[in-house]
Amino acid sequence: MLETSARLLRLLALLQARRDRTGPELAERLGVSTRTVRADVDRLRRLGYRVDATTGSAGGYRLEAGSAMPPLLLDDEEAVAVAVGLRAAASGSVAGIEETSLRALAKLEQTMPSRLRRRIDVLRSATVSAAAAGPAVDAEVLTAIAEAAHRCEQLRFDYLDRAGEETRRRAEPHRLVYTGRRWYLVAWDVDRSDWRTFRADRIRPRTPNGPRFTPREPPEGAVDRVLKGIGRTAWRHPARIRLHVPAEAAADRLPPGSGLIEPAGPRECLWETGSDSLRDLALFATSLDLPFTVEEPAELREELRRLADRLRAA
């Protein structure tokens, strides 16, 4: 009985690791006959696992999704990755999944051997998040957006803009982008016939979705579009700053989501960024310890002059 149980667990691990497996391949890996493989597959089915079988030379076995979640087998690396991901989700930017993530993490860690729990504890104690806190997004909102994009269905939603005004929008969702601070949706605005970037925490989806659409590609990558939008439209004070270092050197110093960096020659680059506070932007720019020139706005140059006067007085 122990030998059969161990073989079933190994068979389940093989089916979970790859979508399709032939009978002879499974028999060779398990060291049994193809007849025994068929019997073991029937045992898995009785335990609630949906294993489809196809016949012929190209036939084999495939583990399909069932009506309920059966137990999963994870190797050491997979278990550590899931645990780290659950802990990050418990303190992340998706609202409503913190408690669920902690419950799942507790269940996972209870079944882990001590060597894996120690690896996770070591990683947790040596790691600190530098991501800026941003507004949380309801998990159902992200799911609704992702499903509309997957099904190529128009997304109908109410949107609260930066001025606090609510509008009703129709869009063809393209990609969700997470910058480490906020979630953004890149989509084709149906009524404005142009690409737009929406903050996901300001989206309230309506049901049902609109008609299906043929996917289209934006003129620039989704991430680049969001980063450019962060600099030009997401902030009260958009700014354009010339950094007198190569783009690669600037990218090493700037945190993700701080704006878009574009090369402007072998030794310079342009940084599209912004802030709701000119004072905060001036302090942040000077803290980078990089030579720079403010191209716009003029108000940022004035704020830097006031900051310089205060520093000289100190």
Image: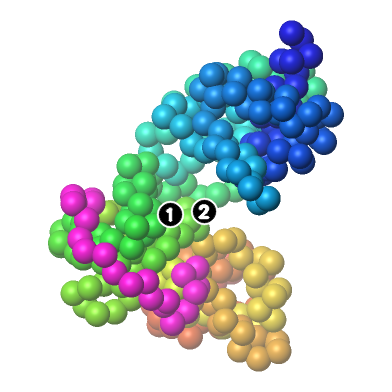
Within 10 Å of the Cα at label 2, are there few (<14), some (14-19), or many (20+) other Cα atoms? some
Within 10 Å of the Cα at label 1, are there few (<14), some (14-19), or many (20+) other Cα atoms? some
In this image, 242 relative to 197: left or right? right
Disc 1 marks a residue whose amino acid type is Arg
Disc 2 marks a residue whose amino acid type is Gly
Q: Tell me where residue 218 sits by quadrant.
A: bottom left
Magenta stretch: includes residue 260: no
Residue that protrudes farthest toward the front in the picture: 56
Is there any visible trace of residue 77 in the rendered image?
no
**Disc 2 on helix, strand or loop?**
loop
Image spot of residue 266 (x, y percent):
71, 89
Image spot of residue 183 (x, y percent):
41, 55
Q: Residue under label 2, please give it.
A: 180
Image spot of residue 69 (x, y percent):
48, 27
Magenta stretch: includes residue 208: yes
Is there any visible trace of residue 308 in the rendered image?
yes
| Highlighted magenta segment, given as a residue range | 204-224
Q: Nearer the viewer, residue 77 or 70?
A: 70
Image spot of residue 251 (x, y percent):
65, 70
In this image, 11 relative to 279: left or right? right
Q: Tell me where residue 250 sits by quadrant.
A: bottom right
In this image, 189 relative to 1: left or right? left
Q: How far separated are the C-alphas under marks 2 and 1? A: 6 Å
| Residue shown at 65% from the left, 86% from the top | 268
**The C terminus is located in which quarter?**
bottom right
Query: Does the residue at mark 2 contact the one at mark 1 (Cβ under 8 Å)?
Result: no
- What is the magenta segment's predominant secondary structure? loop
